[in-house]
């Protein structure tokens, strides 16, 4: 059986103020086309369908259209992630056609979704994102000590239920779809912090006994190696689109996984890149000159290294790079990470202004800048005295 593993769509997300819905529609088109071309047997969506609990209407419509298109060709299994509202994502689950399974409830984790038949059958166990505070009570067996307030505690309890269900079907291949930060995964800047009690990850060993674990949450596609149980494959499909500059070097993809009596084989399939994401560094003259030509059509983050901050910096960069997302003035002798000067009621306002220019510009204010500061201070003092 061949399944498509994807997730972390974050429909409705923006990138530094840029609406990404059209680009997200593009990768969803590519996913549908891949399912049809490869005649895949199922699709696993490992959470974070939406970027926030109350997604915009356009994102909801796009999700509904995509589900309908996919379900025309194969079963689809969707779980909620930490960005999703389980109640909102799952409110239609009971009335959807059987080929669409949206799992958002803790009580359903040990209820397998059967895909295929005979030697090709795979049982999929869907584990939505488990917030420890919200789910530990429900995951605690009657009469037992309350499950630990941690991601390891709640996911471990869910996996105990799943292993009990798996033991009744020992000859059937098993897949777990889950949304969690598993130890050994490489994070990006765009994932939301899910720490509880100072810990956000769970050991890979909780998935012992499972053939394939289709994970969501981390945006970089990767297969985990450290601490992974024998005969278990654990992968993050990653997000199909870059959502931060920390992901610029990642090759965005989805995973096609083949599962059967012979084991598990995973293949990554690249997703379309709507616009290259780059960080450019140099003087303003360098960036406006021939050196910046190749980045004109990219999403750009620019670090401008002139000693003095150039005038009208943003507008000049924006005219050069129409898809500029972020910029900063970073003179080479600025000491990054140093604390801003302390300000209190006894501070001289002129010294505060000079320190601000020194901190943001990297150099002492010029005589002309100092004259402006003095004039502004005197004017403010005069206005204050007139009231």
Image (cartoon, rainbow, N blue to C red):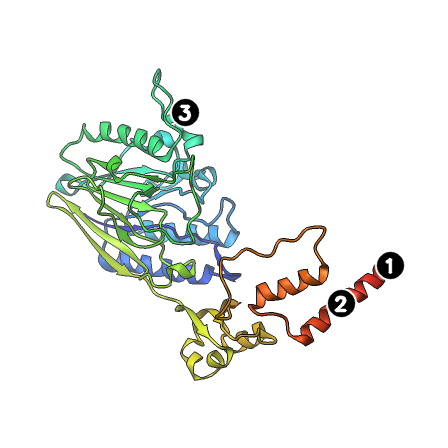
What's the distance in space between the residues labelled 1 and 3, CA to CA? 64 Å
Q: Which mark is residue 219?
A: none
Identify the mark nearer the N-term, 3 or 2: 3
What's the distance in space between the residues labelled 3 and 2, CA to CA? 61 Å
Most foreground residue, 54 or 239 = 239
19 left or right, relative to 115: right
Residue sitting farthest toward the bottom = 290
What's the distance in space between the residues labelled 1 and 2, CA to CA? 14 Å
In the image, what residue occupies the spot 41% across and 69% down?
A: 278
Identify the mark nearer the N-term, 1 or 3: 3
Q: Residues within 10 Å of mark 3 (few under 14, many from 20)?
A: some
Count of labels shown? 3
Q: Provide the residue designation for mark 1.
A: 385
Q: Position of residue 280 (x, y in %)?
A: 43, 72
In the image, what residue occupies the spot 39% across and 25% down?
A: 138
77 left or right, relative to 15: left
Q: Provide the residue designation for mark 3.
A: 137
Q: Is residue 337 above or below residue 283?
A: above
Q: Position of residue 11 (x, y in %)?
A: 44, 53
Q: Position of residue 110 (x, y in %)?
A: 29, 31
Element carrying mark 1:
helix
94 left or right, relative to 40: right
Q: Is residue 10 above or below residue 330?
A: above
Q: Provide the residue designation for mark 2.
A: 376
- Which of the two discs, 3 and 2, sits closer to the camera? 2
């Amino acid at each position: 059986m061949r399944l498509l593993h994807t997730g972390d769509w974050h429909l409705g997300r923006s990138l530094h103020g840029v609406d990404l819905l059209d680009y997200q529609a593009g990768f969803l088109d590519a996913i549908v086309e891949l399912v049809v071309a490869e005649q895949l047997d199922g699709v696993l969506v490992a959470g974070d369908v939406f970027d926030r609990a109350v997604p915009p209407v356009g994102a909801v419509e796009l999700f509904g259209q995509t589900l309908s298109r996919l379900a025309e060709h194969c079963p689809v299994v969707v779980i909620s992630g930490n960005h999703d509202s389980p109640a909102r994502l799952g409110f239609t689950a009971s009335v959807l056609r059987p080929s669409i399974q949206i799992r958002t409830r803790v009580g359903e984790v040990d209820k397998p979704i059967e895909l295929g038949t005979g030697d090709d059958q795979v049982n999929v166990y869907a584990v939505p994102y488990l917030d420890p505070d919200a789910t530990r009570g429900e995951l605690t067996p009657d009469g037992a000590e309350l499950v630990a307030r941690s991601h390891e505690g709640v996911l471990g309890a869910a996996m105990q239920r799943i292993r009990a269900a798996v033991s009744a079907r020992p000859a059937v291949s098993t897949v777990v779809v889950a949304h969690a930060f598993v130890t050994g995964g490489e994070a990006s800047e765009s994932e939301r912090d899910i720490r509880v009690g100072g810990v956000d990850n769970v050991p890979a060993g909780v998935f012992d006994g499972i053939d394939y674990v289709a994970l969501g949450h981390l945006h970089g596609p990767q297969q985990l190696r450290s601490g992974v149980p024998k005969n278990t494959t654990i992968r993050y499909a990653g997000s199909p689109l870059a959502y931060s500059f920390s992901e610029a070097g990642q090759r965005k993809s989805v995973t096609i996984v083949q599962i059967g009596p012979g084991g598990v084989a995973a293949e990554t399939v690249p997703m379309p890149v709507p616009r290259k994401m780059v960080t450019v560094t140099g003087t303003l003259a360098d960036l406006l000159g021939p050196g910046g030509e190749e980045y004109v059509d990219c999403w750009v983050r620019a670090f401008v290294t002139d000693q003095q901050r150039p005038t009208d910096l943003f507008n000049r960069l924006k005219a050069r790079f129409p898809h500029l997302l972020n910029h900063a003035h970073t003179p080479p002798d600025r000491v990054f990470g140093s604390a801003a000067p302390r300000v209190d009621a006894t501070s001289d306002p002129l010294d505060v202004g000079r320190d601000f220019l020194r901190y943001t510009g990297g150099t002492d204010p010029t005589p002309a800048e100092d004259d402006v500061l003095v004039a502004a201070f005197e004017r403010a003092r005069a206005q204050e005295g007139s009231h």
